[in-house]
Amino acid sequence: MTLRSVCVFCGANPGNDPSYKETAEALGRRIAERGLTLVYGGGKVGLMGLVADAAMAAGGEVIGIIPRSLQDAEIGHTGLTRLEVVDGMHARKARMAELSDAFIALPGGLGTLEELFEVWTWGQLGYHAKPMGLMDVGSFYDKLAGFLDHLVGEGFVRQPHRDMLQRGATPDELLDRLASWKPTVTPKWVEKAPK
């Protein structure tokens, strides 16, 4: 699969560790330097604003997708290649998925996790065959990865579906993994329903 665009899910806050900010900027810069389009949630605040600003500063194309309610609250980024204003969070996620060839989650909160898990579920159900990854800044996602492995061990997630989610400690490592990822077709259900 050839990557042309990458969707980045990330926090509307910068977080407490300066490495989150540094990695967001490095990821935005590397996406642009690789000639990829950055697709993201359209905000100018937190890690969202940092990843977009870095990609723009490196000469990249950046497309933001923001719900009207957030745009009206004046947090929409006005310095992007394109900012699309949509009618809610469902429309935002659908449009981001439509425009993207891969997905990366930087550190973030509930919204970041919700976006990641929704697009991952879509992949598990076969609605798309696009790679996904965690930008694992300072082992930020270690505990989540452990819990996901627990879900496999308890029979709620199949290993091929768990393996759909890549991890990388640097932007280049993760982007390389996403670019070389090969989808597998595995039914979601671990066992057939009784007749």
Image (cartoon, rainbow, N blue to C red):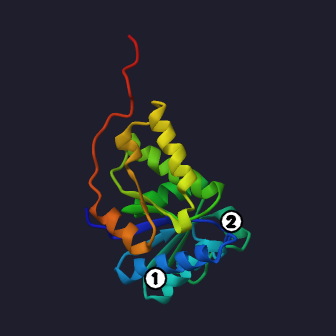
Please, what is the three-letter code of the amino acid marked with disc 2?
Leu
Q: Which corner quadrant holds the N terminus? A: bottom left
Residue 188 visible, this angle: yes
Q: Earlier in the sequence, mark 2 or mark 1?
A: 1
**Mark 2: few, some, or many residues within 10 Å (few <14, many ≥20)?**
some
Question: Of the numbered discs in the image, which one, if any, rests on residue 29?
Answer: 1
Residue at the spot 38% in from the left edge and 74% down from the top edge: 172
Q: Secondary structure at mark 2?
A: helix
Residues at marks 2 and 1 touching, judged by CB atoms closer than 8 Å: no
Give the image location of residue 25, x and y in percent.
Answer: 53, 80
Foreground mark, 2 or 1, reads 1
Q: Position of residue 159 (x, y in %)?
A: 37, 40
Q: Is residue 35 left or right of residue 43?
A: left
* Label of residue 130 in the image: none
Left or right, residue 79 beside residue 189: right
Horizontal side of 97 relative to 91 (left or right) equals: left
Question: Which quadrant does the C terminus fall into?
Answer: top left
At which x and y percent is residue 189?
A: 39, 29
Three-letter amino acid code at the position of disc 1 = Arg
Residue 4 position, x and y percent, is 33, 70
Disc 2 target residue = 70
Residue found at x 47% / y 43%: 149
In this view of the protein, which residue sits in the foreground, 178 or 7?
178
